[in-house]
Image (cartoon, grey):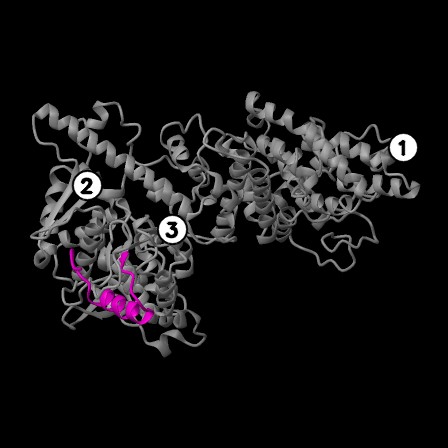
């Protein structure tokens, strides 16, 4: 709606509130002619007029006695078409649909309605003009007339008395004319659909009209840039998507796929308007639209076959529906609880003037600083990580059918190299499961490792040096932190790109080639020492079983950088760590500061205390006796006082400023008090992951899953996927005994078994079913213990003569085994 039209409507509401419509029997409570109406002064009437405009309230038709209120006579032809075939109807209103329905019901023949629906819904210009908010005002088209009206004359005469009210109208109008608003009367459209969709005859007309309409829309948007010249073109999509039957089979075959293709051609600004509009619809409507697009994706995927040559990425329907689903995804975020503030500052990353080997070889495009931000995300100014609580859970946007057929190696190539010409589902990561996204990250990491290895070999040949294709770390078990810290610190300063090489760990004095298992043990031992409470780098909460940064730690920043490096290297080398951080740590790694809501996870006792303060109904100042000064203890138990604001000990906490107190308290605990430690920690993490798509693809809870693995242990799933070698099969007696024994173990014993066999007591992303364990025969009955190759998740199991012996030997092996080569 343009400004002139909006202003005219508000003035009509204002005149209705001050002068009335002239009808002595008026029942409109917002009209001065109504008997129960209480007179308003001009300023109050102006404010009320703005409210009525905002909710599209009822506007009285002027009574004939109010000739000065009329903008023009309304004939009977304005209220009802002159011809029974309705051939002069070129757009629809709610009243018009009601008139046509009444006409058809009287005659028991709906052919006229079907013709009108088919004609209007198949014509883009007709749909744009239909169901407009300003439709009831006949004079809106005559606003630019140079002829002065009686209203104009009266406004001139009374300009002095209504000047303030007019200014209020203009000011309120500026605030309410949201550029993302549309001119469609959504409520009217929904009421019309409720009436039309109850008639079976109308459904086919709507389907056929959409089939005819959408190819023309696609051409208009792709080649004519029609939205740029007429933003009301978006009305078509608003009206069509209010059809609650779009998910039905009649639409899924042809109509909805074509419509989604047209919608995907909308410019980013239009999609952002649509997403903002939907965000105000509420959970039910957004969910219906999300399910409509999801159903189309699932229907298309299961109806076709895909392989290495026929990729789902080339299926136009799936691609278009996924892009439409993105609009609903961001609407769900915008409609929920969002925090676009509280962002962590970027860790400094000084650029070098020297050309890298990647740039010299023309590979800088592949290894640029992470993926570009999503255009819709930039237009809306909100990221998934900004979402505190979306309207629809993230899991509901994951399409399992699609995840089963997407070829992540090909999709990765499109994402990194051919993003401008080929669609990649990684550009819409919300639709991918964490398992699928982890595959994409795995390809990114492996290709980067191979590239670093190739470049090292090339560089070594030119320099005449021995090639060093791995990130080699040699450590002593009893000095593992010192050795790892010195080695990694040297690498990060001299040649940070070496951190992108495949990790190769060697324990001094021990034989063994690192095929993954030695690295797992290295990570385990490093973390055991770093998180030792005696060191004091992290504090441990006995209630939550979680670690937090010690703000008064005596350790230097390099130690915290090492912890961040270990986390980054573990993700990069596909290792699972036994770390126990609260979720706020992963939120901070992805760029968000901690807020008081994060205290629920990290400091639950403090959270409950602050929550009680916010909810307290009594006199906060007198009953609580708090000030904006807090205290805590340092590493040695000494009290430390901290002012949350200047001279905080002199400022009492009151009902009015308690929210500020809570926010400042949480900011101190989660951010400012540990700023030095966390900045060093994040620096180490980014040294490995900054150029990876990690921060683009994964949410905080998914990053935790990558680092820590799943805490749920499903040994039934592991049994189904385990392979056998050396003469064993799933029907071998010793194998049946083995699984019965393992299932009878308690959780602690089962975790020890996982640690013994795989090097970690956590399940990988996707659960134990993704582990691919091997059980191989290791000789006949013997007193020897079972052994394992943690590099390959292989268990070497002798053919014990009884279940009791197997249980005893297995328990001893998993309980006392530690270190490489212990058989």
Residue 320 in the image: x percent, y percent?
54, 34
Q: Secondary structure at mark 1?
A: loop
For the residue pair 410 and 625, the one nearer the viewer reads as: 410
Q: Position of residue 478 (x, y in %)?
A: 8, 59
Above or below for 297 versus 671: above
> Within 10 angstroms of label 1, few (less than 14), some, or many (20 or more) residues?
few
Question: In this rendering, would 666 be left or right of 325?
Answer: left
* Mark 2 surroundings within 10 Å by alpha-carbon count, few (fewer than 14), some (14 through 19), many (20 or more): many
The C terminus is located in which quarter?
A: bottom left
Q: Which residue is mark 3?
A: 770
- The residue beneath circle 1 is 84
Residue bounds of the magenta highlight: 796-823
Which residue is found at the position 60% from the left and 26% from the top? 218
Q: Nearer the viewer, mark 1 or mark 3?
A: 3
The foreground one among 14 and 699 is 699
* Residue 375 appears in the figure: yes
Which numbered disc flags the more N-terminal residue, 2 or 1? 1
Q: Position of residue 379 (x, y in %)?
A: 45, 37
Q: Can you identify the residue that label 2 sits on?
A: 499
- CA distance for labels 2 and 1: 79 Å
């Amino acid at each position: 709606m343009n400004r002139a039209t909006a202003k005219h409507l508000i003035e009509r509401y204002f005149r209705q509130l001050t002068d009335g419509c002239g009808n002595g029997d008026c029942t409109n409570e917002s009209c001065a002619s109504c008997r129960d109406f209480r007179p308003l002064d001009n300023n109050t009437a102006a404010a009320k007029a703005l409210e009525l405009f905002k909710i599209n309230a009822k506007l009285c038709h002027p009574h004939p006695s109010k000739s000065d209120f009329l903008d023009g006579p309304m004939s009977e032809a304005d209220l009802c078409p002159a011809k029974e075939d309705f051939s002069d109807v070129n757009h629809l209103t709610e009243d018009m649909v009601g008139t046509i329905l009444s006409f058809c019901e009287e005659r028991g023949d709906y052919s006229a309605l079907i013709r009108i629906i088919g004609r209007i819904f198949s014509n883009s210009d007709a749909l744009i003009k239909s169901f407009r908010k300003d439709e009831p005002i006949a004079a809106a088209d005559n606003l630019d007339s140079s002829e002065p009206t009686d209203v104009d004359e009266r406004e001139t005469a009374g300009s002095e008395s209504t000047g303030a009210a007019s200014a209020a109208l203009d000011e309120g109008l500026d605030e309410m004319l949201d550029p993302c608003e549309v001119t469609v009367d959504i409520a009217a459209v929904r009421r019309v659909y409720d009436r039309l969709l109850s008639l079976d005859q109308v459904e086919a007309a709507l389907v056929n009209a959409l089939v005819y309409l959408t190819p023309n829309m696609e051409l208009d948007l792709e080649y004519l840039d029609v939205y740029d010249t007429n933003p009301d073109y978006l009305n078509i999509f608003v009206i069509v998507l209010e059809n609650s039957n779009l998910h039905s089979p009649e639409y899924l075959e042809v109509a909805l796929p074509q419509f989604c293709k047209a919608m995907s051609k909308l410019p980013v600004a239009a999609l952002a308007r649509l997403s903002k509009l939907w965000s105000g619809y509420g959970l039910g409507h957004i969910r219906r639209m999300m399910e409509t697009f999801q159903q189309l994706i699932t229907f298309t995927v299961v109806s076709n076959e895909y392989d290495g040559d026929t990729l789902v990425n080339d299926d136009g329907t799936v691609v278009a529906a996924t892009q439409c689903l993105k609009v609903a995804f961001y609407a769900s975020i915008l409609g929920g609880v969002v925090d676009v503030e509280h962002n962590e500052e970027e860790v400094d990353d000084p650029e070098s003037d020297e050309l890298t080997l990647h740039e010299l070889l023309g590979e800088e495009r592949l290894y640029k600083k992470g993926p570009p931000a999503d255009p819709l995300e930039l237009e809306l100014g909100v990221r998934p990580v900004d979402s505190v609580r979306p309207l629809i859970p993230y899991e509901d946007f994951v399409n399992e059918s699609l995840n089963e057929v997407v070829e992540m190696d090909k999709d990765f190539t499109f994402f990194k190299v051919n993003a401008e010409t080929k669609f990649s589902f990684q550009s819409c990561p919300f639709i991918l499961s964490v398992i699928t996204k982890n595959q994409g990250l795995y390809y990114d990491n492996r290709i980067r490792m191979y590239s670093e290895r190739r470049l090292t070999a090339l560089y070594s040949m030119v320099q005449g040096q021995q090639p060093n294709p791995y990130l080699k770390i040699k450590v002593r078990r009893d000095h593992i932190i010192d050795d790892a810290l010195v080695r990694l610190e040297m690498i990060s300063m001299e040649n940070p790109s070496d951190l992108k090489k495949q990790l190769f760990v060697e324990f001094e004095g021990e034989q063994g080639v690192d095929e993954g298992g030695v690295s797992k043990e290295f990570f385990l031992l490093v973390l055991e020492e770093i998180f030792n409470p005696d060191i004091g780098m992290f504090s441990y909460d006995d209630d939550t079983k979680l670690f937090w940064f010690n703000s008064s730690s005596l350790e230097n920043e390099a130690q915290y950088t090492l912890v961040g490096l270990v986390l980054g290297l573990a993700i990069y080398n596909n290792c699972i760590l036994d770390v126990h951080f609260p979720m706020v740590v992963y939120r901070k790694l992805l760029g968000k500061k901690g807020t008081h809501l994060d205290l629920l996870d990290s400091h639950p006792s403090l959270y409950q205390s602050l929550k009680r303060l916010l909810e307290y109904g009594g006199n906060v100042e007198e009953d609580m006796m708090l000030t904006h000064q807090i205290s805590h203890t340092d590493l040695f138990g000494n009290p430390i006082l901290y002012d949350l604001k200047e001279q905080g000990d002199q400022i009492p906490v009151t009902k009015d400023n308690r929210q500020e107190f809570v926010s400042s308290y949480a900011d101190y605990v989660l951010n400012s008090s540990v700023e030095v430690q966390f900045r060093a920690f994040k620096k180490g993490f980014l040294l490995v992951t900054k150029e990876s798509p990690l921060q683009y693809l994964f949410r905080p809870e998914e990053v935790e899953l990558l680092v820590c693995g799943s805490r749920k242990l499903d040994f039934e799933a592991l049994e189904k996927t385990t392979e056998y070698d050396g003469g064993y099969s799933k029907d071998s007696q010793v194998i049946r005994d083995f699984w019965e024994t393992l299932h009878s173990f308690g959780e602690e014993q089962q975790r020890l078994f996982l640690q013994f066999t795989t090097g970690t007591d956590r399940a990988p992303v996707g659960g134990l079913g993704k582990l691919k364990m091997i059980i191989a025969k290791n000789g006949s009955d013997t007193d020897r213990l079972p052994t394992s190759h943690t590099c390959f998740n292989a268990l070497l199991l002798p053919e014990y003569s009884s279940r009791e012996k197997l249980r005893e030997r297995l328990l001893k092996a998993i309980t006392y085994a530690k270190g490489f080569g212990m058989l």
